[in-house]
Image (cartoon, helix red, strand yellow):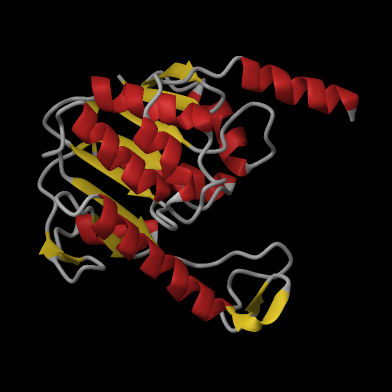
């Protein structure tokens, strides 16, 4: 146990952070999902937005209550890139600690009186409300879709309808993508491959929960990236930021 504590403290000590930003400091207490964004990711997202190719889009796989979406919007403004199209997808499926995420008729952990479907609707509405409140002038095109379905629609050049009932098509490649969806090895690999096929050379991909000390499939997938000559590791903080060569 002591070794684990020492290791965790060492990871925290080595984390790079951006300069003090009061909006970002307040954000976790303003938006649902406050404990779900690693502080090291803030530095990596800021780095990617600052250095990404200028003629593409930003994409997010996995939106939850809007914490990372509002962070990205804020950082786009900070770097005067608020006109960059920002597109995301999420199924807003609640995955409990002890029950299958495919059983949508079950309840949330610890309270059998609250159905999973009700909770899923609550989180989705929290996303909608948070981006409308905090960034009404640059609301992302957020789609209620699996990432697989999202890329199928894109591949077939079909029209999307987002959760704000706006229709749109994608006519640019990806400059930066934050992958924070299903953390299994298989889905992380599928998401990474779909993103990379639609990414500008020089674009960035941040994979959440990919740090070396984690046991998620997303962390195990990084081993493949390290042997892929089409990509390079830009930073580890402790999750991995990758650039397409």
Q: Is residue 92 above or below residue 215?
A: below
From the top left corner, tell me how far across and down residue 210 is, in percent: 56, 33
Q: Which residue ends up furthest to the right in the rendered image?
A: 1
What residue sits 57% from the left and 46% below the top? Answer: 35
Residue pictured at 64% horizontal, 42% vertical: 216
Which residue occupies the foreground of this view, 3 or 133?
A: 133
The residue lying at 70 percent from left, 70 percent from top is 109
Q: How many marks?
A: 0
| Nearest the eye: 12 or 84 | 12
- Residue 134, above or below 114: above
**Where, quadrant-wise, is the N terminus in this rendering?**
top right
Left/right placement of residue 87 relative to residue 31 reads left
Percent from the top left, x then y, of residue 237?
Answer: 52, 22
Residue 188 visible to an observer of this rendering? yes
Q: Nearer the viewer, residue 26 or 199?
A: 26
Q: Quadrant of residue 99?
A: bottom right
Q: Is residue 184 left or right of residue 231?
A: right
- Where does the image place residue 8, in percent across and percent down from the top left? 72, 25
The quadrant in which residue 71 appears is top left
Q: Position of residue 162 (x, y in %)?
A: 22, 65
Q: Residue at x 54, y 29 (%)?
A: 222
Residue 194 in view (yes/no): no
Q: Is residue 19 left or right of residue 105?
A: left
Specify the quadrant that holds the C terminus: top left
């Amino acid at each position: 146990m002591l070794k684990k504590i020492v290791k965790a403290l060492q990871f925290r000590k080595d984390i790079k952070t951006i300069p003090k930003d009061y909006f970002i400091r307040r954000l976790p207490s303003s938006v649902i999902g406050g404990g779900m964004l690693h502080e090291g990711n803030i530095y990596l997202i800021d780095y990617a937005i600052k250095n990404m190719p200028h003629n593409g889009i930003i994409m997010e796989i996995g939106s939850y209550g809007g914490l990372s979406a509002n962070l990205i919007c804020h950082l786009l403004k900070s770097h005067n890139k608020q006109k960059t199209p920002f597109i995301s997808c999420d199924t807003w499926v609640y995955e409990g600690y002890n029950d299958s995420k495919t059983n949508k008729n079950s309840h949330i952990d610890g309270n059998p009186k609250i159905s999973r479907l009700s909770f899923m609707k609550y989180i989705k509405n929290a996303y909608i409300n948070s981006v409308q409140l905090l960034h009404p002038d640059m609301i992302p095109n957020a789609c209620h879709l699996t990432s697989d379905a999202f890329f199928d629609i894109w591949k077939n050049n079909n029209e999307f309808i987002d959760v704000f009932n706006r229709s749109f098509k994608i006519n640019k490649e990806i400059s930066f993508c934050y992958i924070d969806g299903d953390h299994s090895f298989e889905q992380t690999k599928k998401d990474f491959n779909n993103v990379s096929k639609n990414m500008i050379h020089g674009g960035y991909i941040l994979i959440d929960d990919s740090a070396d000390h984690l046991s998620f499939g997303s962390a195990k997938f990084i081993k493949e990236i390290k042997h892929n000559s089409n990509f390079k590791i830009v930073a580890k903080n402790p999750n991995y930021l990758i650039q397409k060569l």
